[in-house]
Amino acid sequence: MKPDSPFRCLLALVTALLCNPVTLTSAADGQWRSVAGPVAARIVRIIDGDTLEVEAHPWPGHSVRVSVRLRGIDTPERRSQCADQRAAARLARNELERLVRDFPTVELINVSGGKYYGRVLADMKAGTRDVAAAMLASGLARPYDGGKRHKPQCAG
């Protein structure tokens, strides 16, 4: 057999693919790391000021229930040790509920997975309103880029 025969080239290619399956897996994983959307979703419940549980409808006849973390914002935590932070968390949750209350469905855009404890990360629109931007405008949320979170001090 000649060193440059088609069979030898095919054998080298198959061997390379079998010995390095990560290349194929990584390419497929990268393709599904985010969904541009919009994906229609019905709100099941508001968890806190920056997280909701939704029933998303990514394609006809199918739905998935998932928690969604709103991209770009952070709100106080309901389980904070600080009473003032728990009160602020209730206000933020109530504001988020007010913003989406009148919409039978919302749109999830730029949906991605990641380090969010089983949640997806997404932009959300209720009608034409960007929900995260409205939360920031309310003063009940602060900008958040995914880095280290602000840890408030309890008021005296």
Image (cartoon, rainbow, N blue to C red):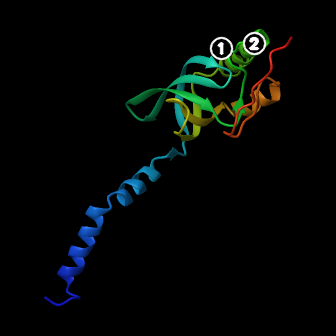
Q: Residues within 10 Å of mark 1 (few under 14, many from 20)?
A: few
**Residue 144 pos. (x, y %):** 72, 36
- Residue shown at 54%/41% (left/top)? 112
Work out which residue is located at the far right of the displayed protein and give it. Answer: 156
Judged from this view, the residue extending furthest toward the left is 1
Image position of 23 with respect to 40: above or below? below
Find numbered disc 1 in the image and state the secondary structure of the residue it sits on: loop
Residue at 53% of width from left, 39% of height from top? 114
Instruction: Give whichever of 42, 135 is nearer the camera.
Output: 135
Which of the labelled discs sits on residue 62, or is there none? none
Local SS, label 2: loop
Position of 46 relative to 39 (above/below): above
Quarter of the figure with the C terminus: top right
Residue under the image location 72 percent in, 21 percent down: 76
The disc labelled 2 sits on which kind of residue?
Answer: Cys
Image quadrant where one finds the N terminus: bottom left
Is 17 placed left or right of 53 in the picture? left
Q: Which residue is mark 1?
A: 79
Q: Quadrant of residue 149?
A: top right
Foreground residue among 62 and 69: 69
The residue beneath circle 2 is 82
Is 104 displayed left or right of 59 in the figure? Answer: right
x then y, percent, for residue 58: 45, 36
> Which amino acid, mark 1?
Arg
